[in-house]
Image: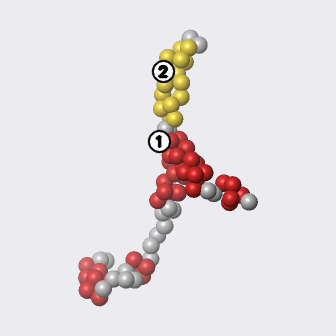
Amino acid sequence: MLDAEHRTVDQMRETFALVRQVAHGVDEPVFYQGSVCGTVRKYDAAWMAMYLGRVLGPIRDVEASELFKDAPPEVLKWAVDNLH
């Protein structure tokens, strides 16, 4: 039931648009003598981390065997000879 209501393409598009907007900074009002005289943009690293974590995926170490698993023999030989 929750997936049907909350994980639709439209719902996720709306959610990620909001997360992206907040991750890029939120304009907060600046007050002077009780009146709004301007805005200042506030950034929050946690929102940017969440946004990038969802868009790019989590950062993880890659094993050499996974990195070169489809490499042709010439590339493997070059890597052994040149990467230390």
The residue shown at (49%, 17%) is: 37
- The residue under label 1 is which amino acid type? His
Q: Secondary structure at mark 2?
A: strand
Which residue is depicted at the point 59% across and 13% down? 34
- Mark 1 or mark 2, which is nearer the start of the sequence? 1
Question: Dot 1, how many residues are within 10 Å of its Cα: few (below 14), some (14-19), or many (20+)?
Answer: some
Q: Is residue 77 left or right of residue 44?
A: left
Q: Amino acid at mark 2?
A: Gly
Relative to 80, 46 lies left or right? right
Give the residue at mark 1. Answer: 24
Expressed as whole percent of the image width and height from the top left, the position of residue 57 reads 50, 62
Q: Residue furthest right?
A: 1
Quadrant in which the C terminus is drawn: bottom left
Mark 1 residue element = loop
Pick the front one: 62 or 83: 62
Q: Is residue 61 above or below residue 55?
A: below
* Residue corresponding to mark 2: 38
The spot of residue 82 in percent (x, y) is 25, 79
Mark 2 touches mark 1? (CB < 8 Å):
no
State the residue at coordinates (52%, 51%).
Answer: 51
- Quadrant location of the N terminus in the rendered image: bottom right
How far apart in space, not on screen, are marks 2 and 1 (Cα)? 19 Å
